[in-house]
Image (cartoon, helix red, strand yellow):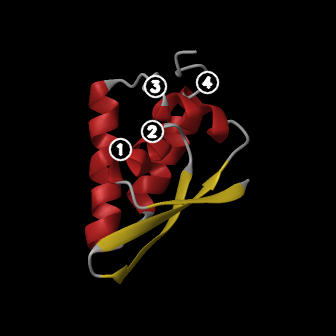
C-alpha cells in the first residue's frame, strides 16, 4: 500500500470504485479539495486505464461511490468511503478493460 493524492473528483470516485481506501480529504484550499488514498499494487493499472478512457464501471455502483466521496468532501465522514472500498476490493478483480 502506498499513498496517492488527487484533486479530481471523478478520479477519486473511480479510486473508491476500484477498492482503494480514501484516508483523508484536505479542504484547506477553499477552491480545491485534495483526496488522499492508500492504494494497492493494482492501482497503476487501473489509473492507466482511466487516463486512457478504457476503464469500465457499473453505473449504479459508480454513482454510489460518487455519493460516498461527495459525503466525505462535504461532511468529512470517511466511513461510507471505507465501506465502498471494501466492496470495491471484493469486486475489482478484472473490471478494467485491457
Q: Nearer the viewer, residue 18 or 4?
A: 4
Q: Closer to the camera: disc 2 or disc 3?
A: 3
Q: Is residue 77 visible?
A: no
Q: CA distance from mark 1 to mark 2?
A: 6 Å
Q: CA distance from mark 4 to mark 1?
A: 17 Å
Provide the residue designation for mark 4. 93
Q: CA distance from mark 4 to mark 2?
A: 11 Å
Report the residue at 33% width, 35% height from top: 62
Q: CA distance from mark 1 to mark 3?
A: 15 Å
Q: Of the two numbered discs 2 and 3 on the same chain, state the one appearing first in sequence.
A: 2
Circle 2: element type = helix
Q: What number is the disc on residue 90?
A: none
**22 is higher (above) or lower (below) than 73:** above
Provide the residue designation for mark 3. 55
Q: Hey, which quadrant is residue 14 in on the image?
A: top left
Please provide percent x and percent y for residue 70. Answer: 28, 58
Circle 3: element type = loop
Q: CA distance from mark 4 to mark 3?
A: 13 Å
Q: Nearer the viewer, residue 82 or 74?
A: 74
Provide the residue designation for mark 1. 65
Please provide percent x and percent y for residue 2. Answer: 71, 57
Please provide percent x and percent y for residue 31. Answer: 26, 75
Furthest residue in direction bottom, as rendered: 28
Question: Do tag 4 and tag 3 residues touch (Cβ < 8 Å)?
Answer: no
Q: What number is the disc on residue 17?
A: 2
Question: Do tag 1 and tag 2 residues touch (Cβ < 8 Å)?
Answer: yes
From the viewer's perspective, tell me whether residue 4 is left or right of residue 64. Answer: right
Q: Residues within 10 Å of mark 3 (few under 14, many from 20)?
A: some
Q: Residues within 10 Å of mark 2 (few under 14, many from 20)?
A: many
Report the residue at 49% width, 55% height from top: 82
Amino acid at each position: 500500500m502506498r499513498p496517492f493524492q488527487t484533486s479530481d473528483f471523478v478520479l477519486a470516485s473511480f479510486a473508491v470504485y476500484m477498492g482503494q481506501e480514501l484516508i483523508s480529504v484536505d479542504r484547506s484550499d477553499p477552491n480545491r479539495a485534495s483526496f488522499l488514498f492508500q492504494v494497492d499494487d493494482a492501482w497503476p493499472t487501473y489509473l492507466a486505464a482511466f487516463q486512457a478512457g478504457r476503464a469500465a464501471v457499473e453505473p449504479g455502483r459508480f454513482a454510489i461511490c460518487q455519493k460516498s466521496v461527495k459525503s466525505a468532501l462535504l461532511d468529512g465522514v470517511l466511513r461510507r468511503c471505507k465501506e465502498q472500498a471494501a466492496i470495491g476490493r471484493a469486486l475489482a478483480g478484472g473490471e478494467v478493460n485491457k
